[in-house]
Image (cartoon, rainbow, N blue to C red):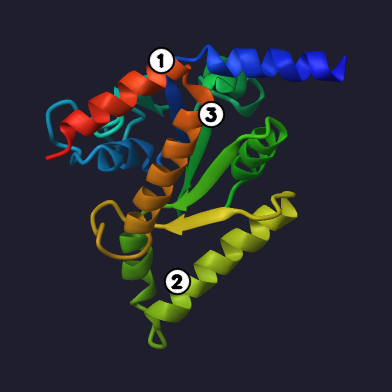
Amino acid sequence: MGNNSSTERRLDIFEKNTVDIAVTGVWGAGKSSLVNALRGLSDFDEGAARTGVPQTTMEPMCYPHPIFPNVRIWDLPGIGAPRFEEKEYLEKVNYSQYDLFIIVACHCFTTYDTQLSRKIQKMKKRFYYVWSKMDVNIKIEKRKPDFNEKETLQKIRTDCFHNLRRAGISSPDIFLISVWDQDKYDFLLLLRTLENDINELRKCILRPEVLQDSEKRSHDREP
């Protein structure tokens, strides 16, 4: 019976025509801005995901990856908002359809971060934990007379690591970023890591004929 289940899972995987990446997390963490940055856009460019102080993402929004054909980035509504309480959130955003998750957080680690990371791990899918708005964090910390940027970064990274370990995540992938200072912190590392994982996911998930076409189109886009 176990072998049959494995075969069914493989068949399900190879029937996919797209790789789907979900950007999720609490409301106001900067998810939409990160979606734009991953696509090489600013918040003000044509075709960018909507951003704003009031919650602007009220349903899952799909955007094409700028480099990889057949790869889609999904901007999900913020968990914990009135229409997206934790108990119904996963069902409302159709969590099972996504292949890789990016949990976006800022300012503090929340129970929602714990719940999301546990649910994703239970599905045996990979996720990144992205601490956004580092520019804001550093600006606040600079007010302290004993400010040390290197120590501040290490403290935030360590806190994220320990919180995720307490949630049962053995080897969390943690990135500290600012979409406004992309050459600082971990943003470029995030891009490289995502690109590598997309390449692996395309090989594992896309149907062979779809993968072949996708690779051809990627090659055609190269200068």
Picture coordinates of residue 187, whole percent (x, y): 34, 56
Give x and y (percent) for residue 143: 34, 77
Residue 209: image tag = 1
Q: Which residue is situated farthest in the right direction here? A: 1
Name the amino acid, label 1: Glu
Q: Nearer the viewer, mark 1 or mark 3?
A: 1
Q: Which mark is residue 204?
A: 3
Q: CA distance from mark 1 to mark 3?
A: 13 Å
Residue picked out by circle 2: 153
At x 61% / y 35%, what residue is drawn? 125
How far is mark 3 from mark 2, CA to CA?
35 Å
- Relative to residue 63, is residue 194 drawn left or right? right
State whether residue 6 appears in this view: yes
The image quarter in which residue 3 lies: top right
Camera-nearest residue between 64 and 92: 64
Disc nearer the start of the sequence (3/2): 2
**Dot 2: what SS?**
helix
* Residue 176 position within the rendered picture, expressed as x and y whole percent measured from the top left: 42, 59
> Where, quadrant-wise, is the N terminus in this rendering?
top right
Q: Amino acid at mark 3?
A: Cys
